[in-house]
Image (cartoon, rainbow, N blue to C red):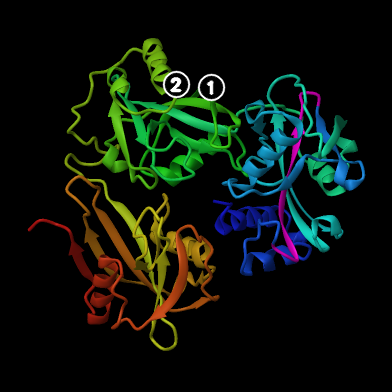
């Protein structure tokens, strides 16, 4: 399958967040993303997406190819997106390999740009009567990679390329790409762009994460460490790790976080991925972690690892750490949930959710249709909602409303109208679901997180769609009846 529109929109949104002044230039691309047709297909006119790569060696030089079709111009390696390219970056990596012979494993992402394009260039292409192609436009997404080995040999694709050369940054032939590279710090060379953490309980157990078995997931369906990839806004790899943990397991609060080692693995695109490994201490129960991504968390001893499906090298890494750091305490009872510091014995940690009960001038309530692949409530209608992230509930609601739908809420005009005390199962963390009514707000509901919500729509609260999240339906019915509290999922 070619890259999805959701994936492309995410890249464009991130790019325009860094370069808002280029929005007018990229107007045709934004229009193409809203038009019918496959925007990455070379047959799509009047324009389509292409992908290029700036490969930077250890001396800070950038690989160029002498392109036959352009009359011998020196350009960055690149070309059209093929149906088998899952992402735009994958297309750029493939083009480098095809045109220069440099394999994906010889490349790694740059810390300056990570998985996002450094430049998006819009340029016209002359008609090619020999191929029956009319004049059209290319929207060229340009990614940056570091060369992993100190040097490499190139083997050109003779029918398209006459030669290769490594040019200094200030000689990069594309003006827009040259300015982006010169403005970034490209001096570091290959360095970790991912961060993971060995979480242990100081008693011989290690926390491992069973990843989703879904297309496009890195290391799907196996146990791995928690962590993720660096984003351009991250100030450090520790910041990367803490951001990823807040997104994936907000209930995990680490202590004694420190760097441990740098390991290498391979991405879904075949790139080399240097990973900064940290170690940290946590002694909580997996059910209290508030897992948002993946299937489950599990405490494992080094001796159990060989019985489990796991990411390459995980067992060796954990056994190495265990040999260097023998258990310092007695192992906790696996059935005992350790309370947070200062909480009374027997306290059960709850996940707190915030929900927006928003009505228009006709009394209709706003609901969003969850993405079919959403981790929660796929294909169901739900209020705008989110989890508290170590913040007060009203601030969480205001943040979620702007992030998910572009709505601006007035803090002084927000009222708590209902609370649902729910439990999905006997082993899951119970939840406090807070429903707030906003009496004053501005903006038009927009789909800002299309991987989670695909549509916003207003409904008569007395005639909700059949595929409404059950506790949402229960809460709306209770609000209409004036009841401030309800519960769901508890054994009587």
Identify the mark nearer the N-term, 2 or 1: 1
Q: Measured from the top left, where is residue 76 in percent x and y?
A: 80, 40
- Determine the image quadrant of residue 321: top left
Residue at figure coordinates x 43%, y 79% from the top left: 439
Q: Measured from the top left, where is residue 462 in percent x and y?
A: 28, 83
The residue pinned by badge 1 equals 263
Mark 1 Cα-neighbour bin, 10 Å: few <14, some 14–19, many ≥20: some
Instruction: Give the residues in magenta.
Output: 44-59
Residue at figure coordinates x 29%, y 34% from the top left: 284
Which residue occupies the extreme left position in the image? 492
Q: Is residue 65 above or below residue 85?
A: above
Residue 313: numbered disc: 2
How many badges with numbers are in the image? 2
From mark 2 to mark 1, how far is it between C-alphas? 9 Å
Q: Is residue 125 left or right of residue 439?
A: right
Classify mark 2: helix, strand or loop: loop
Classify mark 1: helix, strand or loop: strand
Secondary structure mainly formed by the magenta segment? strand
- Determine the image quadrant of residue 214: top left
Which residue occupies the extreme bottom position in the image? 362
- Front position in the image: 375 or 491: 375
Q: Is residue 446 left or right of residue 49?
A: left
């Amino acid at each position: 399958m070619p890259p999805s529109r959701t994936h492309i929109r995410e890249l464009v949104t991130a790019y325009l967040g860094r370069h808002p002044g280029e929005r007018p230039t990229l107007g045709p691309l934004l229009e193409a993303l809203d038009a019918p047709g496959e925007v990455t297909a070379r047959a799509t006119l009047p324009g389509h997406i292409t992908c290029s790569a700036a490969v930077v060696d250890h001396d800070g030089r950038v690989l160029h190819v002498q392109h036959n079709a352009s009359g011998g111009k020196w350009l960055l390696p690149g070309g059209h997106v093929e149906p088998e390219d899952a992402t735009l970056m994958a297309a750029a990596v493939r083009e480098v390999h095809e045109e220069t012979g440099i394999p994906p494993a010889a490349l790694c992402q740059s810390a300056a740009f990570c998985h996002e394009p450094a430049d998006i260039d819009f340029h016209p292409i002359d008609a090619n009567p020999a191929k029956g192609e009319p004049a059209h436009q290319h929207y060229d997404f340009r990614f940056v990679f570091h060369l992993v080995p100190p040097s490499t040999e190139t083997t050109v694709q003779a029918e398209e390329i006459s030669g290769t050369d490594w040019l200094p940054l200030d000689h990069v032939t594309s003006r827009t790409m040259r300015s982006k590279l010169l403005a970034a710090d490209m001096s570091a060379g290959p360095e970790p762009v991912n961060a993971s953490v060995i979480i242990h309980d100081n008693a011989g157990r290690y926390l491992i994460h069973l990843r989703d078995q879904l297309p496009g997931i890195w290391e799907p369906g196996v146990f791995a460490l928690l962590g993720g990839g660096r984003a351009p806004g991250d100030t450090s790899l520790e910041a990367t790790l803490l951001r990823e943990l807040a997104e994936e397991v907000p209930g995990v609060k680490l202590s004694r976080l420190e760097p441990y080692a740098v390991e290498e693995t391979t991405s879904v695109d075949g790139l080399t991925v240097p990973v900064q490994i940290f170690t940290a201490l946590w002694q909580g129960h997996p059910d209290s972690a508030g897992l948002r991504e993946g299937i489950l968390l599990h405490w494992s001893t080094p001796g159990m690892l060989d019985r489990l499906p796991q990411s390459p090298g995980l067992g060796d890494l954990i056994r190495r750490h265990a040999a260097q750091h023998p258990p310092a305490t007695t192992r906790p009872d696996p059935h005992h949930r350790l309370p947070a510091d200062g909480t009374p014995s027997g306290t059960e940690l709850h996940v707190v959710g915030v929900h927006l009960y928003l009505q228009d001038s006709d009394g209709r309530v706003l609901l969003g249709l969850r993405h079919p692949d959403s981790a929660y409530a796929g294909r169901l209608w739900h209020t705008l909602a989110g989890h508290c992230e170590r913040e007060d509930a009203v601030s969480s609601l205001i943040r979620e409303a702007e992030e998910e739908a572009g709505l601006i809420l007035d803090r002084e005009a927000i009222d708590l109208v209902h609370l649902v005390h729910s439990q999905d199962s006997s082993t899951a963390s119970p939840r406090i679901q807070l429903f707030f009514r906003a009496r004053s707000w501005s903006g038009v509901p927009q789909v800002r997180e299309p991987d989670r919500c695909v549509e916003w729509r207003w409904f008569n609260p007395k005639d909700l769609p059949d595929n409404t999240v059950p506790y949402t339906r229960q809460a709306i019915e209770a609000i209409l009846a004036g009841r401030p509290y309800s519960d769901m999922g508890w054994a009587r």
